[in-house]
Structure formats: structure tokens, C-alpha cells
Amino acid sequence: MHSRNAKPPAAATVARGIRRAELPPLNLLYTFEAAARTLSFTLAAAELYLTQSAVSRQIQQIEAALGTALFERRHRALGLTEAGRVMHRAVSDCLERLRDATASVRAPQATRQVAITTTPGFASLWLIPRLARFTASHPLVDVRISATLEVLDLQRSGIDVSVRLSTISQGVGSALFEERVLPVCAPQLLKNRALPLKKPADLARHTLLAIDKPQGQSLTIDWEPWFKMMGLAQVRMKNTLRFSQYSDVVAAAVAGQGVAIGRLPLLDALLRDGRLVAPFAGAASRFGYFVNLAPRAAGNADAQDFVRWLMAEAELAKREGGNAVA
């Protein structure tokens, strides 16, 4: 039986919050920490992208709120008062703890990535020399290039964008550019009077540089559009150097080891800067490069930007390419 005079149970104690009046203006503490750490309103202003006068005003506001000086203004020097040192230790400790807590609870950011598959020749000769322009405008995007002759399944391989060489009639996707072919060699071969390259028949006295073709295919299959345009039967050259990659064929041509069939616009830059020359006119190869965006990339804005960038670079290459073989 309860006594009539008994007091009701005490209510659960609720922790009292920190009142705003008990703290200095919190929005100014970051400025105070920078000024106290550098002992310079000028350096703090540069760090915080403020003016020196703005930092000075904010420090004055904190000091006014506390009713005490935090800095000693000396001639061309700044020092902390005892109150300033106490506040600096406390503010630095609080900001560091808040930074660490933020890092521990912040959700991890998803990696931004664009994965591309293309041929080794296109990757090394055309794409990679230009790629810095894309990464400069997309510094947070990781770019992954799979350079292979194998045609990959975009969905299963985790690929966002493909750039592939195909016949013009069977190309799928957005046309990047059509290909032209023509013989190319190092400039020193044209200066060799003992082995001139004045007419197509002169090729018979030079070394053929070619990709090693599957059994049953002619090593000069890449030359056939050019032979046809020139009205020639297949020209048999003196001897042959075979390579597994087109980029190696091009490297051998630059080194003066023979004559290769040049694919434009892949070699436009080499022709423009004079590392390669074209002794004869070019011909359309009936092939072209086509760009495809994988269905998985429908929600990848960076992959879509990459495709737009590719198309813009191709347009630029067309305008520049007119001077490559002039």
C-alpha cells in the first residue's frame, strides 16, 4: 500500500545538450585552426581561398565571442596567447576526431570506369596517343583498354565500348571513319638511288613488311585494294619480314627495314611528322572502324562521354588527315 505522501518515481534523467551560447561560432573554427597552425593570416587565407582581411575579420569575431584575445599581433609576426594555445589544442583535436569519424562512416564511392575493347593497331597507333585528352577532362575515371584481335562478348567481358574494324557493308554501330590504304616507308628508302621507288613495279626490289596471316591467306591481302586501284596484278617483293602485330610492322617501316601497307587514319601522325612517307597514292580499303556501346553501359555516363569524345576526335582526325599525305 502506497503512502499518501510518497513521491512519484523520478523521471529518467535526460542528458542536457550543449547550448549554442557555450561555444564559439562553429563556422569560424576552421579559419581559426588554419591561422593558429600557420601563425599567418595571409597563409591561412591562401589555404582557405579567402582574402587576408576576411580571415582577420573572422578571427576578430571569435575573439569577440570569447571575450579574450587568441593571437598576439606583433610587428610582422603573429603568435598565440595562452588562451589561443588552449583553443588551438582543443579545436585541432576535435577536427581530427571529426575527420576520422567521417572517414570511418562515409559510404565508399563506386569506382568510375570505362572499359574499351579494340584491335592492338587501333589502340597503339590511334587511341593511346590521343587518350590524354579524355583523361584530362575526366580525371576521376579509370580507363581500361583490352587490345585484342579477339571479338569479345561485351556483356560477359564487362566491356562498355568496342571499336572494331569491319567491312563498310557489314559494319554495326556508329561509323568512326573509313580506312584508306597505301604503301609507306621510311624517308631514307626514297633517297636510295640504287633501289628507287618511282613506280609501283619498283616494289619488287624491296622488302615486304606484313602481318603473319592465317594459313591460306596471302601476305599481301591488305594490299589488294591498292593493287586493284593501280590496275596491278599482285607484286612479288624481294623478301618478307612477318610480324604478329600491325604496330610492329609500322615500327619496322619507320626503322627503314622495308615497305608496309599503311592504314589511314592510323598512320596520319607518322606521315604528317615525316617519320613515314607515301611514295604512291592511296585507295579505299572498303573497311571502316565502328563504335558500339554495350547495353550494360546504358547507365554509365562516362562511357557515353567516351563515345562522344571518340566521335569528336575522329572528326578532328579527318580534318587533320587531309594534310598527312599531301
Image (cartoon, rainbow, N blue to C red):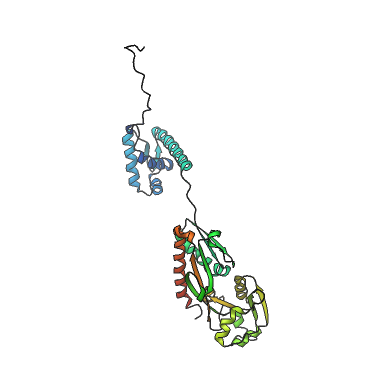
**Near-viewer residue (137 or 300):** 300
- Check the image and report above or below for 198 versus 39: below
- Check the image and report above or below for 44 versus 311: above
Outermost front residue = 1
Q: Is residue 232 left or right of residue 46?
A: right
Image spot of residue 93 (x, y percent): 45, 36
- Check the image and report above or below for 116 versus 259: above
**Near-viewer residue (63 or 99):** 99
- Check the image and report above or below for 109 versus 256: above
User: Is residue 130 at least partly visible in the picture?
Assistant: yes
| x 41%, y 37%: residue | 91
Q: Is residue 239 left or right of residue 167?
A: right
**Near-viewer residue (112 or 4):** 4
User: Is residue 185 at least partly visible in the picture?
Assistant: no
Image spot of residue 250 (x, y percent): 60, 73
Outermost right residue = 239
Residue 187's quadrant in the figure?
bottom right
Q: Which image quarter holds the N terminus?
A: top left
Q: Is residue 178 left or right of residue 60?
A: right
